[in-house]
Amino acid sequence: MRATRVIVFNMDESFSPALRKMLHSIPDVRIVAEADDPAMLGTVASQFQADVLMLHLDPSPAAVLAIAADLVPAHPNLAIFALSESTDGQLILSAMRRGFREFMTKPVDPEILSTAFEKVVATAGDQESCGKLITILGTAGGVGATSIATNMAVELKSMTSGGVCLVDLDYRFGQVATFLDVSPIYTIADLAQATEELEPQTVERALVEHSSGVRVLSRPTHFTQSENITAASCVNVLTTLQSMHDYVVVDGPNRYDVGASAILDLADWTLIVAQLLVPSVRNAQRILQGMDEAGFDLERAKLIINRISRESGPLNIDDVEATLNKNSFATLPDDWATVCSSINLGEALATRSPKSKIRTAIRDLATLIHSPDGDGSEKEQGKKGNLLSKIFSDA
C-alpha cells in the first residue's frame, strides 16, 4: 500500500516547522506539495495526486475557509483537514457543513491526527501500489554520491521483480547517464513541461533502459533547460515514477532549496553521503540541522560514510558520529581504482568488478534498503569531546 499523500496549505511561516514535524511524525505520510497562496489551492489540488489537504486556516480563518470550500465538490476524493487556534463554534460548524473531513484546534493531539489519517486510509479502499523513493545527497563534490546512486539502483534491480528507475537531479552537471553509458533522447526537462498530471505513457518515452534493467531519467541536455524545472513539476515527475516502479533512486538534489525540500518531503529514505574530511562532515551537520529546523523526519535520513581506509587521516568514524549525534547507517571502503575504472568504462560495479569490496559494500547497503527489518537501523549518539569539537564550535 502506498503512503498517504498530503498537500499542506499554510500562510504562517513561523508555524511551518511545527506543522511539518507533526505530519512527518505519522508513519507513511508524505507531503507532496505546499502552498501559501489561497488563490493557488485549486491549481495545486489539480496538479498533485493527494489524499489529504491539510489546511492551516490562521491567520485568516474565514477567508481561507471560503476559498477552500470550492475544492470539496471539485475534488470529492480529497479529504480536507482544517486546522486553527480558533474554537469558534460557528467557524467549526461552517467547515463541517462545507464538507471538510476534520476540524482540529491547536495544539493538535497527535493521537487525534493519527486517527484522522487512519480513517482516510480505511475509507480509500484498495490503492495502487507505490514504489519507495530514495534520495542520495552528497555533502560535497566528489564524495561519491553518483557512484553510490547508480550502483545501488543496479543492485536493487537484482533484488526485485519490479521496476527500478534512476533519476539525475543534478540539472547542470549530472553524470548518471555517463556512469551507466546510456544515451537518452529525452530528459527530465521534457517531462517537467507538463502542467497537469503526467500519464505513464508519456513518462515511458523519456526513460532509457540500461542492460541491468534499470531505467534512467537523465538531467537536461542544456544548462538553460534547468531554469524551467520547478519544484512542483519535479515532484509530479517523481510521484508518477513511483507509481510505475518498485524503487526510484534519485541522485540529488545537489542543493538545499525549495525544490530539495519538496523532494525530501516525498522521500522514504534520504542517504547523506559524507567522507572523513572536515568540509564534508561540516556540510553533513548543516544539512541535518537544516532538515531538523524545517521539521523533517530525521529517522528517514541515514548517514553513509564513504571511502574508509587506513589512510583516512586523523578523523575516524567515532568522531563523525559523535559530532553529528548520529550513527552511520553504512560505511563503504576506499577502492578508488576499481570505482574509477568502472566510471571511465561506463560499467556498473556488478559487471566490471563483481567481487570487489566496494561492490559488496554497496550491495549490502541495497539489502538494508530492500529488507529494512534487519539489523541495520542506527541509534542516535551523545558522545562528548572529540577531535572535531573545537572546529565545529567555531563554525
Image: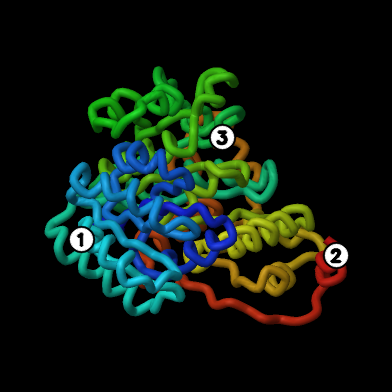
What is the secondary structure assignment of the residue under circle 2? helix
Q: Nearer the viewer, mark 2 or mark 1?
A: 1
- Say which label, 2 or 3, has the lower sequence index: 3
Residue highlighted by disc 1: 97
Residue 16 lies, with reference to residue 35, above or below; the image says: below
Residue 196 placement, left or right of 192: left
Q: Which residue is drawn at the image coordinates 40% and 51% (left, top)? A: 63
Q: CA distance from mark 3 to mark 1?
A: 47 Å
Residue highlighted by disc 3: 170
Please say whether residue 252 is visible from this viewpoint. Answer: no
> What type is the residue that disc 1 sits on?
Arg
Dot 2 crowding, Cα within 10 Å, few <14, some 14–19, many 20+: few
Residue 150's label in the rendered image is none
Residue 243 placement, left or right of 286: left
Model colouring: rainbow
Q: Which residue is drawn at the image coordinates 40% and 20% (left, top)? A: 186
Q: How many numbered dots are placed on residues in this image?
A: 3
What is the secondary structure assignment of the residue under circle 3? loop
Residue 364 lies, with reference to residue 238, above or below; the image says: below
Residue highlighted by disc 2: 391
Please say whether residue 189 is visible from this viewpoint. Answer: yes
Tell me if label 3 and label 1 are in contact, CB under 8 Å.
no
Q: Nearer the viewer, mark 3 or mark 1?
A: 1
> What type is the residue that disc 3 sits on?
Asp
Q: CA distance from mark 2 to mark 1?
A: 58 Å
Quadrant into which the C terminus falls: bottom right
